[in-house]
Every structure is written in C-alpha cells, then in structure tokens.
Amino acid sequence: MPLTFPLSYAEFLAVLPISSITMECPEVVEISQTAGAEVLLDEIGNRYWQGVINLGRMQRHEKREAQVLVDAVRSASGSFFASDISQSFPQNDPTGSGLSGATPKISSLPADKRLIGLSGLPSGYTLRRGDYLSFTYLSNPTRYALHRVVDATVTANGSGVTADFEVMPHIQPGAATNTSVELVRPFCKAIILPDSVQPGRTNRFIHEGMSFGFMQTLR
C-alpha cells in the first residue's frame, strides 16, 4: 500500500532506531554596521525548525528497513511530522497523563504575535519555559505550527484558562482561536534536506553512522 505523506510519528520517527536528535529554530537576520560602528540587526524572514537525526547501531536487517523508509521520505513528495523526541511531554507532566480527558485549545491571539493564550487545560496545569506546543492553521495546504514556551511558568486557572504568554517563533497569520493544541509530542511538518543523508557504514554484523537533516515546510 503506498505511503501517504506526511508520515505520522508512529509511521516514521517511532519506527527508526534514533540515538539522538537536534532541533532548533535559527534566526533569519541581516547584519550591517554604520560608519559610527553601530551594529544593526534586521529580521529578513520567518524562522523555521530544522535539525539532524542520528540513528543508532543497527543489525543489517534493521539497516535495510530504516534505509528504505528514509529513502522514501527523501523523495520530492515526501514529508513527515517532526517532533523533538527528547522532549515529548511538558516538563511538569513527563508522561502526559495529566492531560487525560483535556482538550487544549487556543483561547487568545493578541495583536502581539509573540503571545498566545490557551483554554481546555486541567485546573492548575503548568507549562514551563522550553515546553513545546503545536497546532494547525489555514488550509490547502494545512500548515503545522510548532512553538516553545518562553515564559518561566504558565499556569491554568480554575477554569483551565491561561493568561497570554510568550512563545517562539512568532505566531503566523492564519492562526485562529478555538483551534486544538497538541501538548503531547507536538510536531511540525518537515522534509529531509537534499544531500543531507549520511548512509553510514556496515561491518560484518553491525551498521552505524546513518543520519539525515530535516527542515520544517509549510507546503
């Protein structure tokens, strides 16, 4: 049966024998300097998630399975849901069980695009700086936003609603209130970067050194 892209966490990341992952959202700035030695920075584009996934040591049959899956996703039409598997859950809820039965949603989108508010959380539920959240916006194509909490702590009140808090990167146009929010394995849509796949090496029994880079895509 043909693969349907983007591949879900269960279809791609959960299947690969990942040993490590890096995930960052680098700045997109232009730097200039005046005659008076003043350094000026100017944002020239949106920030997108990118990173590198390293696979661990594999037996030869495991290598074959991993390689063909990676090769399928690195095609021009391939994509997958990228998630920081080292931080799959909020720090104060390391199994995600505290969200059982909850339906987090966007409650507020102030004019300041750094800010967002959530509702539908358990009373007293707390997010901490560095926790991830994700949601979809727009359509044709659907876009997948992934953000990290900047505030030191964000705590839901007795009604499960938070105050507005800062996230990075900035919220993009098209985000809407009442949209469902993922706090367990938050993700964005990503592609494998061309020419980034390192096939690794095989000895008599073991294969190691396979890796690839990825980058968020909005298409």
Image: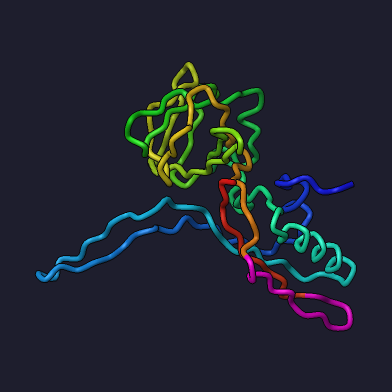
Residue 197 is situated, as x and y percent measured from the top left of the image, at: 68, 70
Judge left or right: residue 46 versus residue 3. left
| Quarter of image, res 61 | bottom right
Q: Residue at x 54, y 58 (%)?
A: 50
Of residues 77 and 72, the one drawn nearer to the viewer in this rendering: 77
Horizontal side of 12 relative to 183 (left or right) equals: right
Residue at (89%, 46%) from the top-left corner? 1
- Colour pattern of the rendering: rainbow
The image quadrant of residue 21 is bottom right
The reply to whether the magenta stretch includes residue 131 is: no
Residue sitting at x 66%, y 27%:
100
User: Is 204 on the left-hand or right-hand side of 44?
Assistant: right
For the view shown, which residue lies furthest in the left direction?
36
Instruction: Name the spot of residue 107 as percent of width and height, x first.
Output: 46, 23
Residue sitting nearer the eye, 70 or 4: 4
User: Magenta stretch?
Assistant: 194-207
Q: Quadrant of residue 168?
A: top left
Q: Measured from the top left, where is residue 199 in percent x and y? A: 74, 74
- Residue at the far top: name it: 159
Q: Nearer the viewer, residue 191 or 135?
A: 191
Q: Is residue 32 above or below residue 6?
A: below
In the drawing, does residue 49 fall left or right of residue 10? left
User: Vertical placement of 136 versus 68: above or below?
Assistant: above
Q: Is residue 205 magenta?
A: yes
- Residue that extends furthest to the bottom in the rendered view of this protein: 203
Q: Estimate the x, y position of residue 43 in percent, counting from the top left.
A: 32, 54
Q: Main secondary structure of the magenta part?
A: loop
Q: How many marks?
A: 0
